[in-house]
Image (tube, rainbow, N blue to C red):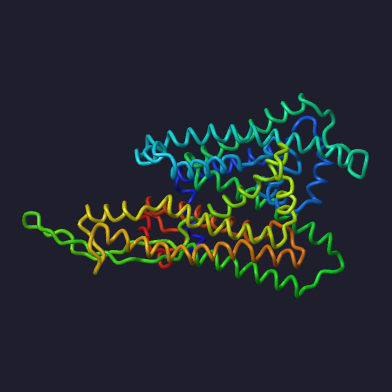
């Protein structure tokens, strides 16, 4: 009952209620845009083409919440923004100017965000042009055949209209995500991806039961349900898992009062990169398809191999996830800065000298923890997809989508609980299950 009482406290907080309603409003606007088709495209033919495709096309359609099969104004989804973020992260390693801006605090962060927005628009222009060329190419492949023409009037008029429409749609999604982050609850970009994945589950289940009518095996359904529950439990366990490094604060005397001397710990999450590695890896795997639409030599062959969705795709996907786990952790977590902060606070790790040795020790611990986190993310993203393919389950039940859905749900619930606790309410999990229990209102 403590869980329900925690939810009952939400309407009592006007600020939290307004934030939740604003986030829901953003998702409603996004879902409405998914069904607005780009001018000059036959939606029926496009849905037939996407339904027969697999691998990257299904992944892109999943992340866009079905916007690709409708060729809507949101067909590119949030992926150009994610790709721009990856480029900015890489620029931080090779450009001193970007690295200095990152250390400038709030002002530098705003400049980097502005550059990311400009990069998103540039990438959206290139990707929308690639989409227009791919659609015109489908006319030559399927014209007059089973499906018909995708594009009614090919040419530069259609291409410019597609570039303008899809780029504007991506810019609107980016703006909606930022507004949801600032004025809503949770991370706006993650919530948009969350809504895109969840929206495809009912239709995916309907397609599964329709395609296997009369051949559904109850035992197979139980096995799949057990695997899904086990994956959810694994995600929750690892997302909350921490490696705690003990810290001892030095005792100092100011006048007659003695400060410090207490023991604490430095928490290091097993999965420091959160949901970023699978999203980054998915975005990178979609680049060959985008480049093939621009007639770049060799990209069409690579895209064809990845689009099959077989062991080659899964192996490359797992390798990229492991790489981005270490890369993103190395970029966002700086052991030297942590060691300097501990030294300024007159804190030290027992048995480790402050300064360089502390930074090296923290770096070793983070590296070992990241190994486990990277293997966990790779397994949770690949294994369920293989099982889903073996049991002919729709792609929405893959490991990547499962991890994103559970991770976003945990993050959002944690933010709601933090708002409740700051207003002297018990958290969603009650006073016994949470570490920070608030006071009950008088």
The image position of residue 47, as x and y in percent, is 80, 45
User: Does residue 18 appear in the picture of this structure?
Assistant: no
Identify which residue is drawn at 65% across, 44% down.
Answer: 287
The image position of residue 104, as x and y in percent, is 34, 38
- Residue reaching furthest top? 157
Q: Toward the viewer: 207 or 315?
A: 315
Identify which residue is drawn at 44% across, 43% down.
Answer: 92
Above or below, comparing residue 72 to residue 427 in the picture = above
Q: Quadrant of residue 262?
A: bottom left
Q: Toward the viewer: 410 or 382?
A: 382
Above or below, comparing residue 12 to residue 315 in the picture = above
Q: Is residue 309 left or right of residue 148?
A: left
User: Does residue 94 appear in the picture of this structure?
Assistant: yes
Q: Is residue 114 left or right of residue 121?
A: left
The image position of residue 88, as x and y in percent, is 49, 41
Q: Quadrant of the C terminus?
A: bottom left
- Residue reaching furthest front? 297
The image position of residue 212, as x and y in percent, is 84, 64
Q: How many marks?
A: 0
Q: Toward the viewer: 81 or 91?
A: 91
- Residue reaching furthest bottom? 219
């Amino acid at each position: 009952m403590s869980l329900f009482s925690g939810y009952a406290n939400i309407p009592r907080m006007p600020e939290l209620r307004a934030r939740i309603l604003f986030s829901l409003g953003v998702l409603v606007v996004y879902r409405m845009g998914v069904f607005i088709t780009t001018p000059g495209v036959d939606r029926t033919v496009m849905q037939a083409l996407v339904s027969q495709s697999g691998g990257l096309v299904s992944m892109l359609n999943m992340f866009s919440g079905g916007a690709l099969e409708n060729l809507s104004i949101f067909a590119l989804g949030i992926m150009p923004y994610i790709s721009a973020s990856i480029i900015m992260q890489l620029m931080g390693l090779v450009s001193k100017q970007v690295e200095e801006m990152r250390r400038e605090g709030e002002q530098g962060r705003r400049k980097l965000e502005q550059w990311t927005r400009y990069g998103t628009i540039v990438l959206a222009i290139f990707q929308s042009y690639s989409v227009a060329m791919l659609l015109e190419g489908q006319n030559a492949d399927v014209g007059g055949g089973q499906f018909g023409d995708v594009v009614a009037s090919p040419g530069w008029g259609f291409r410019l209209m597609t570039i303008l429409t899809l780029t504007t749609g991506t810019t609107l999604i980016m703006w909606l995500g930022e507004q949801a982050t600032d004025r809503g609850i949770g991370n706006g970009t993650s919530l948009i991806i969350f809504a895109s994945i969840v929206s495809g589950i009912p239709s995916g289940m309907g397609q599964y039961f329709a395609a296997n009518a009369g051949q559904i095996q109850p035992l197979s359904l139980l096995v799949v349900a057990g695997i899904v529950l086990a994956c959810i439990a694994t995600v929750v366990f690892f997302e909350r898992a921490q490696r705690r490094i003990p810290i001892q604060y030095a005792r100092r005397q100011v006048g007659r009062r003695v400060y410090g001397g207490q023991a604490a710990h430095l928490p290091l999450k097993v999965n420091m990169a959160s949901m970023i590695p699978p999203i980054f890896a998915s975005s990178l795997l979609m680049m060959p398809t985008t480049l093939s639409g621009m007639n770049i030599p060799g990209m069409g062959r690579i895209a064809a191999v990845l689009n099959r969705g077989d062991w080659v795709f899964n192996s490359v996907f797992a390798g990229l996830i492991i790489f981005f786990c270490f890369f993103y952790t190395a970029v966002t977590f700086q052991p030297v800065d942590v060691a300097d902060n501990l030294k300024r606070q007159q804190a030290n790790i027992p048995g480790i000298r402050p300064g360089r040795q502390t930074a090296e020790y923290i770096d070793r611990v983070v590296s070992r923890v990241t190994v486990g986190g990277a293997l966990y993310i790779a397994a949770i993203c690949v294994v369920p997809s293989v099982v889903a393919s073996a049991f002919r389950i729709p792609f929405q039940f893959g490991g990547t989508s499962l991890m994103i859905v559970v991770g976003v749900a945990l993050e959002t619930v944690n933010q709601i609980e933090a708002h409740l606790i700051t207003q002297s309410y018990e958290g969603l999990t009650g006073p016994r299950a949470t570490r920070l229990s608030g006071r009950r209102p008088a």
